[in-house]
Amino acid sequence: MTNRSLNKMVDQQNNIADKNDVAAVVIGAGIAGMHAALELAESGCRVILVEKAPAVGGLLAKLDHQFPDDGCGMCRILPMIDRDACRQICLRKGLDHNRITVLTRTEVAAVEGAPGNLNVTLIQNPAGIDPERCTLCGACMDACPVDIPDIFNAGLGRRKAVYFPVPHQADRMAPVIDVTACTRCNACVEACPENAVNLEAESKALVLEKIAGIIYAPGVDLFDPSAVDVYGYGVLPDVVTALAFERMLSGSGPFSGRPVRPSDGGPVQKIAWVQCVGSRNIMIGADYCSSACCMFAVKEAVMAHEKIPGPMETAIFYMDMRTFGRDFQRYRDRAEKETGVRFVRCRIHSIEPIDGEGGVKISYVDGNGGFAEEAFDLAVLSTGRAVGNALPDFAAHEGVFLLDTVPGLTDISASIIAAGTAAGRLLRRMQEKGTAGAVLPQAVNPRSLAADAAAEEAKSRETALFSRKPAYHLVLHGMFESAFPFFDSDAFKAGLSAAGLDIPITRAGGVSCEKGLEDTITEIRASKANRLVIVTAAPHLVKISQWSKWIGLMPSLIRVIDVRPLVLENRSGLNTPELLTAIEMEVGRLRSRSGNAGQQALVEKTALVIGAGPAGLSAALALADLNIRVAVVEKSDGAGGNTAYIHAAEIRESVSALLQRAQQHPLITMYCGASVVSHRGLPGRFVAEIALADGG
Ligand code: SF4
Ligand code: SF4
Ligand code: SF4
């Protein structure tokens, strides 16, 4: 982050108490809180995102890879339909949205008032460093004599009392001072060439008025395994948590991505994961499954094989494997059959040291009731979710929506879905009640389909290009090379050629630097292409409007293919029939496409919901409550879906109440016994053809 943008952040924070147009407050900037904030902001709300830690991201800021495709998952929570309207690039670098103000090191002191007109008192703790002056030179950290375990790296690395809270945000965020560790020796004050350190700064109170609603998303605390002595955690250095192992594998972690045995620095070539640590255990009051730790362990085992050089042996000691989710079971099976991860069904007896050597010995009772022991370099504990702390008083205040506050039963995708639901409910409430002084969101904003319709030069180039017969260019974009190191472009070209697609290809690996971008643009322009297909593993980085300007092509003549779903089928190669088919399809679409001259267009405030089960009815009501006209198409003769087969009275009653509300809602039209015959168009301009029950 440049000094100017640091200044902007400071201005935002200083002026916030004066503003009276704040609409919503989201408390907690983990993945759920950030997703809720983004949903609200993208719907037109002004949002204050409050986080008590010094940086945003929560638990997920520590994770480099996520299942089931081992990519970084944070950016996938970004709104994707309106990709060009969102200026966010990477959530691991922080949150940057012009309708969201992020207040870190801040806690809620009190909530007062009624929903729609809440007053929220915040206390912001000092950073100790003035971001307006700081040039990120690092001299203060060099001078600081304090040396303590680095919590971000699960205690495996060391840090100073003045430190960067998240290593991969160090290029855009000033360091902060940990007041609990600081000895006030003044060394950083003397070392700082910019006079940016202020050890005397005090906490300040901020009062936000006329808040329409609050979403409380405190995030997840993980179980501390030192509470159960059979695992040896905290005593044996070669017993670590799954989160610690994630940091060991990370390039920004304590071992720079090359893990060694913590006990003696020896090689790590045999690793065990121990499941259900702190979950499914009534003895410690945790009778729930934590949902995500099985897949997390499988992912880490696969990553260990891929990232640690030399021979590697991995085993997962489990009671039951929870692989509930799209492609999760397939991912687990591939880990076993292709990667060689061993799955051992058992009950763990103990983890103990090996006399005179590094590593640990795991004792367990196997599936046949036999006792067994095995030595490993490292034991990784799959810690589940901790039993949560008591909720703060303000959580019970009317107008506060709670997220992620019930132990267990929540994985990442469920958190994101819940965050979206909470944001939707808050928007509906704001729509219903209206709020004096608050900015009410528009359900759908007008959007421009043009990249730059006013630029005459670009226009004439577009027209000249478009008037020629279709000529295609294929761009393999951005992170493509790093995501697919085994990609064989010669074989890929041969595959394209065999499919009758002799298209020039540019590998645009360096579009983030000026020279790389210039080379890419020159190459594409030289090919005189007037249709562009961009294949990418990072679709959030592809802004069609930007490419339209760079190449001088109308946006409608550019198509983007997200290859991530295809990679699930074939991890190491991309010469799959699926990718070639996807390219053929996009080329086919572009062949018949007329150039869109880029006029302003208002999005129709209508939506089609297919299916009138509880999910479809809820979605229809959520949209209709935001003043969007909705058609619900249900292929069977009645609404309610599979709940017709459920006998529990309370479920039937709640679905029947949903149905009644939907039937009586003036903006919802129900079509039962109907089906969608065809659809065409783009987001904002879809047209669907519906066959009605009466043959219409
Ligand atoms: S005053 Fe605190 S942060 Fe600064 S150098 Fe001394 S111990 Fe470190
Ligand atoms: S020495 Fe001063 S300018 Fe340099 S990083 Fe520390 S606070 Fe910032
Ligand atoms: S997800 Fe797996 S490891 Fe985690 S608690 Fe459930 S069964 Fe145990």
Image (spheres, grey):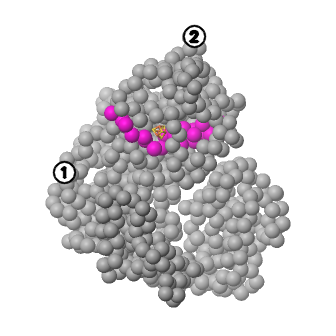
Can residue 161 be spotted in the picture?
no
**Crowd band around label 2 with a 10 angstrom C-alpha radius: few (<14), some (14–19), many (20+):** few
Q: Amino acid at mark 2?
A: Gly
Percent position (x, y) of residue 211?
23, 63
Most extreme residue toward the left is 113
Closer to the camera in the image, 457 or 97: 97
Residue drawn at the location 71% of the way across and 62% of the way down: 579
Picture layout, residue 22 above or below residue 380: below
Can residue 353 be spotted in the picture?
yes
Closer to the camera in the image, 317 or 234: 317
Q: Is residue 35 left or right of residue 11?
A: right
Mark 1 sits on what residue?
110
Which stretch appears magenta?
Answer: 285-307
Q: Is residue 286 left or right of residue 695?
A: left
Percent position (x, y) of residue 575?
76, 57
Mark 2 sits on what residue?
356
Location of residue 225 (image quadrant): top left
Q: Amino acid at mark 1?
A: Ala
Percent position (x, y) of residue 509?
67, 57
Residue drawn at the location 61% of the way across and 74% of the way down: 548
Q: Secondary structure at mark 2?
A: loop
120 magenta-colored: no
